[in-house]
Amino acid sequence: MVHRRSGAPARLAQVALVLAAMVAPVNSSAAFRPVELVDIKGKLHADKLTSMVSEHSDASEGPLSVVSSLGSAGCGKRSLLNAIFDAGFDESFSMKSAKEARCTLSVAPASPRIVVVDADSSTGGASDRLVALHAALADVVLMNIWHSDVGRSVPANKAALRTLLTECAKSDKKTVLIFAVHNYDGSSDGDDEAVLMAEVAAIWKSIPGASGGVESAVDVRFHNLPHARYEPEAYASAVSALKDTLLPLATSSAKGAVGDTESLWTDIEARYASNAPGAADLEAAYSVDTTYTKLRSTAAGAIGSWRRTVDRGARVGGFGNSASKLRGKIINAFNAATQGCGEGSRREARREELMVYLDSAVTELHAAQIAALSAETEAAFSAKLLRLLDGTKDAAPIEDEKVKTAMQKAEFAYAAAVAQLAVPAIGLDGAADVDDMSVTLGDLASKFDESPPAKVLRLNKLTLKAQKNRKSPKNPRSFTPGFHLSGMVRQIGSGNLQGFSSYSAGPHSVTMGYQNDRGTPESMAEGDEPFLRLQPKVHFDIDA
């Protein structure tokens, strides 16, 4: 809320009411123009709504259905509406000052005869009127919340729920309320629904005039949406499932309240007029909102830098210490800057929103870094066990003492790294993570011998050993003597006939030859060329 000292009417500066509708299929959202139902001064422009409805619908076809979307700015509600209805909402989140905030609304293709209404529920007292208008118009209400906010009783969400349920208690027709839980990580196993249902029931019991159980006036449902960036396929599947649930509900339960918007708004204005804040309250609210926006922008800069580091797969150096300092700095700065604004619900709500934003972002970054660190530790421990197995004889099982030593070193290194990430102020001390890692390492060690890497290494070592054993043994040392006799018989002739014969028995052998190349009888008579020649030879075979 904004208060001008010049005396101009107070502006509902942070109230954003967005209306989009599709009453006949079209080819492009460019065919529709933005429609502002409630302007920044809180004035209803029913003529624009009437003109839009008359231009794009036929009253004879029956009443229009209304799907309303509530939730804090930046929680992904407009992205969700665009994904379901192709509504063409501006999904950008601008950190403008409260004085500059404007309504941003558009009309685009949705589904035949469905009007889509969007507004921020974190806008304080002025938004009560808009939430009440949502409840009066809507057949189905989408309440968008962060998964990390479940059970935290966020003031803005709680206030919106109270106003919504108060209006539902006055209606004679049942409203469908669907909690769209964003960034769901699958860790709750259904506990979230019980927590949210308990909160809704508690608020319902505190509403004056509410009779019976909340189920008598509101059909409460739940739908979990995974992280759109990190799990795009799961997110798209969840959106498709929500769309299949939402469209039949909206088209089958039309109140037909669109045509009574002006009278509904007049009644709401009259009922909530007594809650209009004074000038001092408006000034305090403006100061609180301006400080909130400035400090959130400062925090977003630091968190954005950390997120880019984590997205690269790296860890932020000294993350725990830096996150604790940032959290303390932002909260202390907010308390100091808004000290003169009193302890009203506006200051409390904005302080809580800052804390929720910081804690949610820090928790998400902490979880991502712990997951990466755990994966690294498990991989390093498995590699260490493989090295130990490779060093054993014949790939025999690793000694228990060596395994225990390796586990202790891995646990110590992991605990030291977790300590650097710890943010004790929000319960992220890392003790549970260290205990979980100890159990995981013990499980890896107990199952290591049967793991595929260990089996492959053991098989390779045994195969290599078998190959070595198949090599021929070396010959023993030996000393073997041998005798060889060579002989030659020569007769007189022209040398045209010759031949050889040999015989061996172990190391001994005999070789005899014949050739008719001897000289004339005269020369033989002289004894120059003998008829038979013998040549003995002794040899030794030694293997060293």
Image: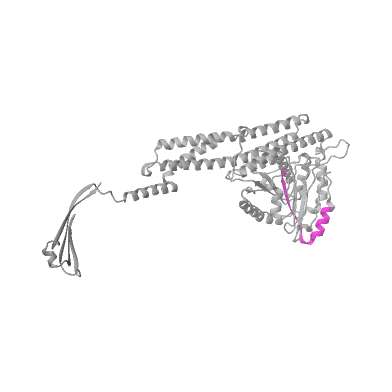
Of 172 and 510, which appears nearest the observer? 510
Q: Is residue 287 left or right of residue 247?
A: right
Residue 67 sits inside the magenta stretch: yes
Q: Residue furthest left?
A: 525
Of 505 and 3, which appears nearest the observer? 505
Looking at the picture, how far across and down is residue 401, in whole percent?
41, 35
Say which quarter of the image contains residue 516. bottom left
- Residue at (51, 34) in percent of width and height: 412
Residue 264 sits inside the magenta stretch: no
- Residue at (48, 35) in percent of width and height: 409
Using the image, determine if residue 344 lies above or below residue 110: above
Of 433 and 204, which appears nearest the observer? 433
Is residue 213 something that shows in the picture?
A: no
- Residue at (82, 59) in percent of width and height: 55
Instruction: Please give the range of residues in magenta.
Output: 48-73
Looking at the picture, how far across and down is residue 45, in whole percent?
84, 50
Check the picture and name the quadrant holding the N terminus.
top right
Say which quarter of the image contains residue 306. top right
Looking at the picture, how far across and down is residue 168, in whole percent?
73, 46
Q: Is residue 493 left or right of residue 39?
A: left
Say which quarter of the image contains residue 205. top right
Q: Is residue 86 left or right of residue 224?
A: right
Is residue 158 something that shows in the picture?
A: yes
Looking at the picture, how far across and down is residue 84, in whole percent?
69, 54
